[in-house]
Image: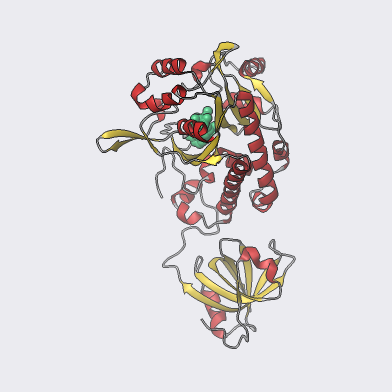
Amino acid sequence: MSNEGLGQDPIPTRVGEIAAHEGAFVELRGWLYNMRSSGKLHFLQLRDGSGVIQCVAFKGEVSEETFALCGELAQESAIIVRGEVRADDRSPLGFELGVRDVELHSAPSGEYPISPKEHGVAFLMEHRHLWLRSTRPHAVLQVRNEVLSACREFMAEGGFMLVDAPILTPAACEGTTTLFETDYFGDTAYLTQSGQLYMEAAAMAFGKAYCLGPTFRAEKSKTRRHLTEFWMIEPEMAYCDLAGDMEVAEDMVAYIVRRVLERCSESLRLLERDTAPLEAAGKAPFPRLSYDEAIEILQAEGSSIKWGTDLGGEDETLLSAKYDAPLLVHRYPAEVKAFYMKGDPEDPRLALCVDMLAPEGYGEIIGGGQREDQLDILEGKIAEHGLPKEAFEWYLDLRRYGTVPHAGFGMGIERVVAWLCGLKHVRETIPFPRTLQRLYP
Ligand code: 4AD
Ligand code: MG
């Protein structure tokens, strides 16, 4: 590429850093997002992954070839643009580029499938690999990126050790109905539903540990809250009870919310997310209800729910609508919860567990609690649930050698991002969603 006649070398930069270069001659490398022309002017919207900037090519300021090239550029042409950064009050960015030169790096081989006009979600999901380039997915995934980095920083500041859990596992953690099975050299392996059991081993080794990675559930239901592949952060703490567990959960969520409000205001604005309802979630402690209290409230509100059943989506929405902040519901009936939950010594029908329900109808974002730490009781639960004891011998060892009270929880990243962004469906919160109907692209 040549800058002959321009008298100086352009400074390579990105749209996201353009404010630092006001008045400078810069080079941006990206793609043509959109274009319009009027007589002597071509307005190129250039996106480079860090933002979108309007580049103005004025006939009198560029070569004839450059002006002609600008007029012919198709959407998603890969282009390198050089020009001067000018302050511009009318643009959301605050700057535009006065074009001096445009280089076409590669022209699209056909018409780009996603035009600036409206498309249905099914069409967009089929083209998710291209849809990622649009401003809306960009904003959502920016929030996801912030949620994930806030999770990691909160854990590091709290002295948690990152311990990666395996994806291929010999046994179920969250019930046998949603297992993805795969052949493992003649044996059966399952895609992990949760890293929890391994984090319990890690907590006994490191005191405080967490994993953050993909988990899998063969969810046959088609809902706006379920993916078959989703990401979870799962902290686990030795010498911790249910009360301590709930404190860490609410502190973590409040930390994430504050971080997203501070650092993602532009993305939230683009998504037209009203951030006022999020303010209350930036401060712990959160309100708490026991399952018993929750059932009383629901029944008084006219719900037909009976003591002993799990809360459905509608029950969760009804309950959380009463609070501005996320709600902690604790001590569910042991019967509706997983085998590893510790029984409540005050009432053996109950489990020492907690769910966190997000406000505004977003439902459960966290599930966790205190674990059964007594060997004989745990053996009994494994048998009761019809689970193969051999596969859990290693897990039982944790109770054989230095068992202590311990607790933890799992937070679904996609549910949190959907809530923070105000999205109806979790499928938009993960780069390439996997659902009952979708394995492509
Ligand atoms: O409540 P769950 O099933 O809890 C566990 O897996 C525990 N073993 C976690 C632990 O204690 N370490 O799942 C935890 C969270 C839910 O609250 C929800 O946010 C999310 O994971 N989740 C899903 N998100 C999207 N799609 C699905 N199919 C999900 N299933 C659970
Ligand atoms: Mg749950």
Horizontally, residue 173 falls left or right of residue 359, namely left
Say if 317 sits above or below 381 in the image: below
Residue 11: x %, y % from top left: 61, 75
Q: How many marks?
A: 0
Where on the picture, by quarter, is residue 192? top left
Q: Position of residue 377 (x, y in %)?
A: 46, 15
Tell me where residue 159 sits by quadrant: top right
Q: Residue furthest right?
A: 89
| One can see residue 425 in this view | no
Q: How is the image coloured?
A: secondary structure
Q: Residue furthest front?
A: 402
Q: Position of residue 9 (x, y in %)?
A: 60, 81
Which of the 4 image quarters holds residue 184? top left
Q: Is residue 20 left or right of residue 423?
A: right
Residue 373 in view in this figure: yes
- Outermost residue toward the left in this view: 186
Residue lying at 54% horizontally and 14% vertically, measured from the top left: 308
Residue at the location (55% across, 26% down)?
406
Q: Residue furthest bottom?
A: 5
Q: For this rendering, which residue is in front, 22 or 32?
A: 22
Image coords of residue 92 (percent x, y): 69, 61
Relative depth, front residue between 184 and 28: 184
